[in-house]
Image (cartoon, grey):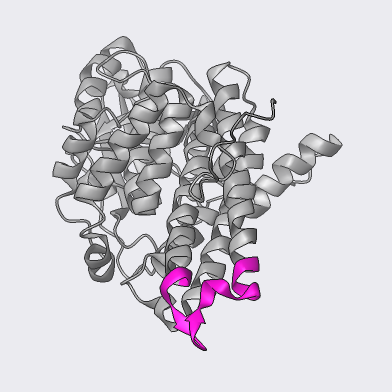
Amino acid sequence: MSASSKLPPFDPADPLGIDDLLEPEDLAVRDTVRAWAADRVLPHIAEWYEKGELPGIRELARELGSIGALGMSLEGYGCAGASAVQYGLACLELEAADSGIRSLVSVQGSLAMYAIHRFGSEEQKQTWLPRMAAGEVIGCFGLTEPDHGSDPASMRTSAKRDGSDWVLNGRKMWITNGSVAGVAVVWAQTEDGIRGFVVPTDSPGFSAPEIKHKWSLRASVTSELVLDDVRLPADAVLPEVRGLRGPLSCLSHARYGIVWGSMGAARASFEAALDYARSREQFGRAIGGFQLTQAKLADMAVELHKGILLAHHLGRRMDAGRLRPEQVSFGKLNNVREAIEICRTARTILGANGISLEYPVMRHATNLESVLTYEGTVEMHQLVLGKALTGLDAFR
């Protein structure tokens, strides 16, 4: 560098210059999703969260479809065909608004649509994917059961042959989008092992009572799925997969979105703390001028932007076809844990104001407690990495 070269100014919003790694198309996707969230979610999210509801979810889904955010990394069938990095940036911006909004998009695209796109028949793809990409049909994904979360191989939901039909019985629990979904991808035990089924939610015997009394992900629709002798035609089964490989590959895709999304919640909390520290006065000066507050802000910024760099690296690996499930576990384990710690530290900077819905910090912190658990608990991801590091299986 010559003596006359001028360094770019330090940007508190991008202290490492990570935007330099993004292409114009990446930035356009990010800015589109950020603008949508600022217009349609942020003015209302505190009220939705306080009331424990997500009103107008079908309209929101159609709007998300119109900006290409549903199934956006999938090819064809009305999907945007975006890169993994672009999908990740969208998840970050959506979760910076609220984890419930990102969950709506993740379950729609990375679980329900992904399962049909990767393992479905051409007829299933043509029937469902264009309408799901447009947000005209909302999907859900039925894997977790009341007694079987981290051990899906022990699921009790069954699908049995009756002539040429399938008959499904069982229960699924903690299902995002369940009571507003038009289609459910349900995993069940069969005589040939675990299989996936595309279940129209208007099928007789199918119901999805909404789960109430949540203190996390309150601006999100969460339901139980009840299947009582749900009769489906032979072609309802996903033909291209048998066993746990099917649902676990879908979960890996969804976990990748969480790696990015959790950093959105962390960023929103960090920005709230930074703004507050600049304006809040105690002892005659802004609290951002005190050493202990600056130490907190510095540590938060370091972990936030390290997490974004990790997400970006994993996105480039996914785009190159080189991303392993263990690496996704690495990202979810690190980024969600650090995001929660950033939220908690931000709350200390805001003091008592940190618990108010006038600020986003406590809302993000409580949401992340759910994000920490779903798509694999901390312990499961630790064991995934432990097995990869040692070659020894500690799950059983």
Q: Nearer the viewer, residue 201 or 280?
A: 280
Task: Looking at this view, name the residue that lies furthest to the bottom.
Answer: 283
With respect to residue 162, does 180 lie above or below?
A: below
Mark yes or no: residue 164 visible.
Answer: no
With respect to residue 67, does 336 lie above or below?
A: below
Residue 218 rendering spot, x and y as whole percentages = 32, 63
- Residue found at x 54% / y 27%: 21
Q: Nearer the viewer, residue 44 or 24?
A: 24
Q: Residue 48 occupies which quadrant of the picture?
A: bottom left
Residue stretch in magenta? 277-295
Q: Is residue 162 left or right of residue 299?
A: left
Q: Nearer the viewer, residue 39 or 206?
A: 39
Task: Looking at this view, name the residue that lies furthest to the top.
Answer: 122
Image quarter (top left, top right, bottom left or bottom right) of the N terminus: top right
Q: Is 282 inside the magenta-drawn segment?
A: yes
Q: Is residue 55 left or right of residue 253?
A: left
Q: Residue 128 occupies which quadrant of the picture?
A: top left
Residue 350 rendering spot, x and y as whole percentages = 46, 75
Q: Is 107 inside the magenta-drawn segment?
A: no
- Residue found at x 57% / y 51%: 304
- Residue found at x 20% / y 49%: 40
- Figure label count: 0
Q: Nearer the viewer, residue 34 or 212?
A: 34
With respect to residue 270, does 317 lie above or below?
A: above
Residue 275 rendering spot, x and y as whole percentages = 42, 65
- Residue found at x 50% / y 48%: 263
Residue 22 rendering spot, x and y as whole percentages = 48, 27
Q: Residue 186 occupies which quadrant of the picture?
A: top left
Mark yes or no: residue 57 visible.
Answer: yes
